[in-house]
């Protein structure tokens, strides 16, 4: 067989990643497997077996240049046409994914800059599925079968690995995620085929959520709303030197809650920021730090900011006196 015919035989198609729905862990878990939900960026790796790899983001954008350390997987997979699904993560000193670190790597299209960052902030590809191998399309194969094939590839390298998949025992898997401070779990039905680009109930993601009490120190105007209606509140937490800014929260507020907040915030307005650190938010309105709110947050960034906070409720029982 000639090199060209061999490559054509192995030439894999583009396959969009399968997506999970949000929901609780399955009540009956004997037909499910559980994987860690990694705090990173989705990545589909494709190679024809010639030593070169192509990396695509969840949206299909080419990110091959962005992660040069992953290009060495081409040598490991030489001779095989493969399409792999995984998550690119950047690990902190404790070995946990840190999305704040990863953000410094994302979107870099300059090869020289990407190579420099790869030495400073190396990434790791957590491979959790295989959709094509040596001319065979595996989309109709069950999750159980695909994981067996994936295990047989022996993907263990300096910047890539195949994390464990636990069959059943969802409660134990959840306890481990909480204990290690990881993002959550993805439950995958053992009989599930691979549905490219679809958000399937056969994959179910459950996130670990923390609730935090924060102090409102300011707000920003809601676009298109009446004057004085907050679109988001600027919040902080108490620190030894005063109120430390931790971010803005707008997601999750109902129109009723925005209206109530508007009336409260108008009474406690002030001219200067109550936060001890600079708050670089355009058109911010400041208030006395009296009101306390409860927010749900997935994680904290390395800079000490709330990541993806969601408004839960105002806490009148914790209102601070002037």
Image: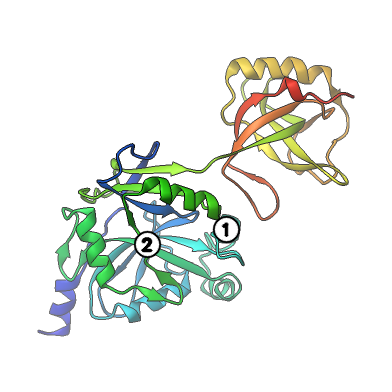
Earlier along the polypeptide chain: callout 2 or callout 1?
Answer: 1
Q: Which residue is mark 1?
A: 98
Name the residue nearer the viewer: 246 or 10. Answer: 246
Q: Which of the 4 image quarters holds residue 112?
A: bottom right
Q: Secondary structure at mark 1?
A: loop
Q: Residue at x 24, y 48 (%)?
A: 195
Residue 110: % across, % down = 53, 69
Q: Residues within 10 Å of mark 1 (few under 14, many from 20)?
A: many
Residue at the (73%, 40%) spot, across then down: 281
Q: CA distance from mark 2 to mark 1?
A: 20 Å
x and y percent of residue 311 in the render?
61, 30
Residue drawn at 31 percent across, 49 percent down:
168
Q: Is residue 120 visible?
A: yes
Q: What SS does tag 2 mark?
A: loop
Residue found at the far left of this picture: 1
Q: How is the image coloured?
A: rainbow
| Drawn side of residue 41 relative to residue 193, left or right | right
**Tag 2 near tag 1, CB within 8 Å:** no
**How far across and how far down the image is residue 232, in percent?**
66, 30
Query: Which quarter of the figure has residue 88?
Result: bottom left
**Is residue 227 in view?**
no
* Front residue of 130 and 156: 156
Q: Quadrant of the N terminus?
A: bottom left
Q: Is residue 271 above or below residue 276?
A: above
Counting from the top left corner in percent of width and height, residue 87 is at 42, 59
Query: Where, quadrant-wise, is the C terminus in this rendering?
Result: top right
In this rendering, the answer to whether 122 lies above or below 233 is: below
Q: According to the image, label 2 marks what residue?
A: 164
């Amino acid at each position: 067989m000639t090199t060209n015919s061999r490559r054509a035989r192995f030439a894999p198609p583009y396959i969009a990643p399968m997506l999970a729905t949000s929901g609780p862990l399955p009540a009956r878990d004997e037909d499910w497997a559980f994987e860690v939900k990694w705090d990173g960026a989705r990545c589909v790796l494709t190679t024809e077996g010639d030593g070169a790899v192509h990396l695509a983001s969840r949206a299909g954008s080419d990110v091959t240049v962005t992660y040069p350390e992953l290009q060495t997987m081409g040598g490991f997979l030489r001779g095989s046409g493969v399409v792999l699904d995984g998550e690119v993560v950047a690990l902190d000193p404790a070995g946990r994914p840190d999305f704040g670190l990863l953000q410094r790597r994302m979107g870099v299209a300059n090869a020289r800059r990407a190579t420099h960052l790869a030495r400073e902030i190396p990434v790791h590809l957590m491979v959790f599925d295989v959709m094509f191998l040596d001319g065979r399309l595996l989309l109709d194969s069950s999750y159980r079968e695909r994981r067996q094939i994936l295990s047989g590839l022996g993907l263990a390298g300096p910047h890539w690995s195949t994390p464990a998949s636990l069959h059943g025992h969802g409660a134990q898997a959840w306890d481990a995620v909480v204990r290690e401070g990881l993002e959550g779990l993805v439950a995958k039905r053992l009989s599930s085929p691979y549905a490219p680009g679809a958000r399937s109930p056969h994959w179910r993601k459950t996130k670990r959520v923390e609730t935090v009490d924060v102090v409102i120190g300011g707000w920003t105007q809601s676009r298109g709303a009446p004057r004085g209606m907050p679109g988001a509140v600027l919040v902080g937490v108490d620190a030894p030197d005063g109120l430390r800014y931790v971010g803005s929260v707008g997601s999750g507020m109902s129109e009723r809650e925005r209206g109530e907040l508007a009336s409260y915030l108008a009474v406690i307005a002030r001219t200067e920021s109550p936060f001890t650190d600079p708050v670089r938010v355009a058109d911010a309105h400041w208030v006395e730090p009296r009101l306390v709110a409860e927010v749900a947050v997935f994680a904290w960034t390395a800079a000490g900011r709330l990541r993806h906070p969601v408004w839960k409720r105002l806490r009148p029982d914790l209102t601070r006196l002037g």
